[in-house]
Image: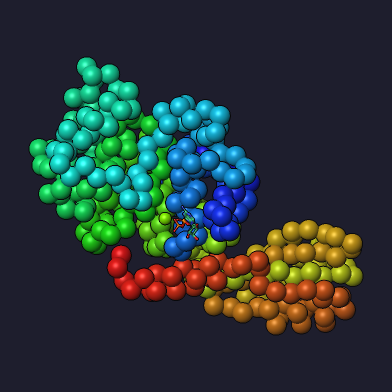
Amino acid sequence: MIKVDGLTKRYDRTVAVNNISFEVEKGQIVGFLGPNGAGKTTTMRILTCFMPPTDGTASIAGFDVMKSPLEVKRRIGYLPENPPVYPEMEVHEYLSFVGRLKGIPSAELPQRVKDVSERCAVADVSKKLISKLSKGYRQRVGLAQAIIHNPDVLILDEPTAGLDPKQIHETRDLIRSLAGVHTIILSTHILPEVEQTCDHVVIISKGLIVAKDSVQNLTSRLRGQEAVLVEVAGASTDDVRRRLEQVAGVSRVLHKDTRNGAHVFEVESLPGENVRASLARAVVEAGWNLNELHAAALSLEDVFLELTAAEKAQGGQQ
Ligand SMILES: Nc1ncnc2c1ncn2[C@@H]1O[C@H](COP(=O)(O)OP(=O)(O)O)[C@@H](O)[C@H]1O
Ligand SMILES: [Mg+2]
């Protein structure tokens, strides 16, 4: 439903997004997780036709954001990081205004406004000025305007930023209730947000995608598992695999590649086990060559540490 392929965005000297690719399937709710400055908002602005990429492509429901922006806009609802505010409008006026902009026929408009107000739990403030609303209500009005034309895809940029815990809880419930009907991508810099709201996650750091996984896989890895890359030469793939699987603490051995007679395996271990030394010993004792052994790429644990560091640096303003 959402397809991003080799997307790059440069601002003068800053490369905000660097050749990223990912896909979101229909009906999924995907967390776009990364610290501040990672490139989340930039990606979302490209997906919503707000600005063009420097390179690469993005499409929504098969429509390219550059070639068919009208088709794209019809199919997406967007909650920007800083939603435009119309403090002097009442909630129902604002929703009708957005509905008209999105081409909803006037005859259907009042019913649509009523429906989305109920769905987003803002019906009770429908006659209130937007300036008088709490941040939680304002965010739900933002969600109501995003779904008013019943788009296939929702793009939500930090939908719970700046809310208090109760409002965060309500907003997450609302977003989850919208999943299924809509395909959703939401950005956040907070890991628990992804755990509680999303089924898949794409992690971005410094403009690069560092992980794409189901939330289940991500969280089990973060609970102390680590992946180690091992490159071994001097034996068959099967022999090496069997030997690595026998090492105490190893939970999974994946064959990644064979090049010039050397086999590369990714080895996952049980929570809390550090298997690197045992892996090295097993290979050497078998009389094989250990060409390489190191933590796999940028581990999710590393990413997580970076994320929490970014969160702390913010001084708890979330
Ligand atoms: N309009 C802009 N002009 C120049 N640099 C920008 C602009 N917008 C964002 N950036 C830079 O691009 C990088 C990614 O920003 P952004 O997409 O807003 O990240 P995130 O939403 O993940 O916090 C940051 O280094 C930011 O400073
Ligand atoms: Mg942002």
Name of the residue lying farthest toward the top: 107
Residue at 21% of width from left, 54% of height from top?
135
**Residue 118: x, y in percent?**
19, 36
When the figure is inspected, residue 231 is found, relative to residue 134, above or below; the finding is below
In the depicted view, which residue is nearer to us: 122 or 90? 90
Ligand 2 falls in quadrant: bottom left
Residue at 22% of width from left, 23% of height from top?
109
Residue at 17% of width from left, 33% of height from top?
93
Quadrant of the rendered image containing residue 184: top left
In the depicted view, which residue is nearer to us: 64 or 174? 64
When the figure is inspected, residue 52 is found, relative to residue 238, above or below; the finding is above
Number of numbered discs visible in the structure rendering: 0
Q: According to the image, what is the colour scheme of the structure?
A: rainbow
Left or right: where does residue 25 sit relative to residue 146? right
**Residue 82: x, y in percent?**
32, 50
In the depicted view, which residue is nearer to us: 68 or 76? 68
Left or right: where does residue 253 sit relative to residue 10? right
When the figure is inspected, residue 155 is found, relative to residue 298, above or below; the finding is above
Name of the residue lying farthest toward the front: 12
Does the image show residue 18?
yes
Does the image show residue 198?
no
Residue at 76% of width from left, 82% of height from top?
281
**Residue 8: x, y in percent?**
60, 49
When the figure is inspected, residue 96 is found, relative to residue 85, above or below; the finding is above
Left or right: where does residue 118 sit relative to residue 154? left
The quadrant in which the C terminus is found is: bottom left
**Residue 240: x, y in percent?**
80, 68
